[in-house]
Amino acid sequence: MYLIQKTEYGYHITFSGTILAEEMLAWLEESRSILARSKEEEFGVLVDMRALTPLDKLATQHMISGQALYKSSGMIRSAVILSSPVLTLQFLLLARASGIYHWERYLDASRIENCEKAALDWIINGIDPDEL
């Protein structure tokens, strides 16, 4: 399941459960529609993946396309909250490989006490949680 919500800083996206390629493609298409209608030139994105199971290869490809879409549509920073060190490492490596790491940070909720505050500090104020 996924949910996209408009916020004062940009967008809050939640991914949970098992998301297969078809549903990830639906998220990508809905994101295209939302971002095409947006009048914001710059925005932040908070992604909550605490309840997400690992993605299969095709779903991961759609996720990478979505990351590129948000970046090209005006995303200045994003933070992703995950619940396990394994998923955090997987997505951190993905971000470095896809070139989005400069704008996106991954926070392990099992390790960081107030990960939502750390995420918003990064998105809104540019305070890098990797340097704390």
Image (cartoon, rainbow, N blue to C red):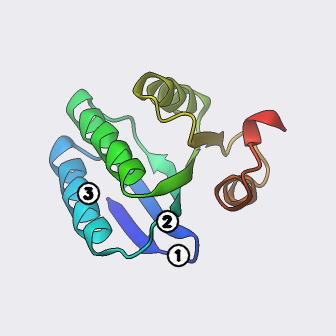
- Crowding at label 1, few (<14), some or many (≥20) Cα neighbours within 10 Å? few
The residue labelled by disc 1 is: 7
Helix, strand or loop status at disc 3: helix
- Crowding at label 2, few (<14), some or many (≥20) Cα neighbours within 10 Å? some
Q: How far apart are marks 2 and 1 (CA)?
A: 7 Å
Q: Position of residue 46 (x, y in %)?
A: 54, 58
Q: Which sits earlier in the primary sequence, circle 2 or circle 3? A: 2
Asked whether the beta carbons under mark 2 and mark 1 sit within 8 Å of each other, the answer is yes
Q: Which sits earlier in the primary sequence, circle 3 or circle 1? A: 1
Compared to residue 81, the image places residue 10 above or below, namely below
> Which residue is drawn at the image coordinates 40% and 54% (left, top)?
15
Considering every residue shown, the one lying at the far front of the view is: 41
Q: Which sits earlier in the primary sequence, circle 2 or circle 1? A: 1
Going by the numbered disc 3, the residue's amino acid type is Trp
Nearer to the camera, 4 or 112: 4
Asked whether the beta carbons under mark 2 and mark 3 sit within 8 Å of each other, the answer is no
Helix, strand or loop status at disc 1: loop
In the displayed structure image, the side of residue 95 where residue 113 appears, left or right:
right
Q: Distance between the residues labelled 3 and 1?
A: 18 Å
Nearer to the camera, 66 or 14: 66
Helix, strand or loop status at disc 2: strand
Q: How far apart are marks 2 and 3 (CA)?
A: 13 Å
In the displayed structure image, the side of residue 92 where residue 124 appears, left or right:
right
Q: Which mark is residue 12?
A: 2
Nearer to the camera, 28 or 72: 72
Q: Quadrant of the C terminus?
A: top right
The residue labelled by disc 3 is: 27
Q: Position of residue 59 (x, y in %)?
A: 25, 38
Going by the numbered disc 2, the residue's amino acid type is His
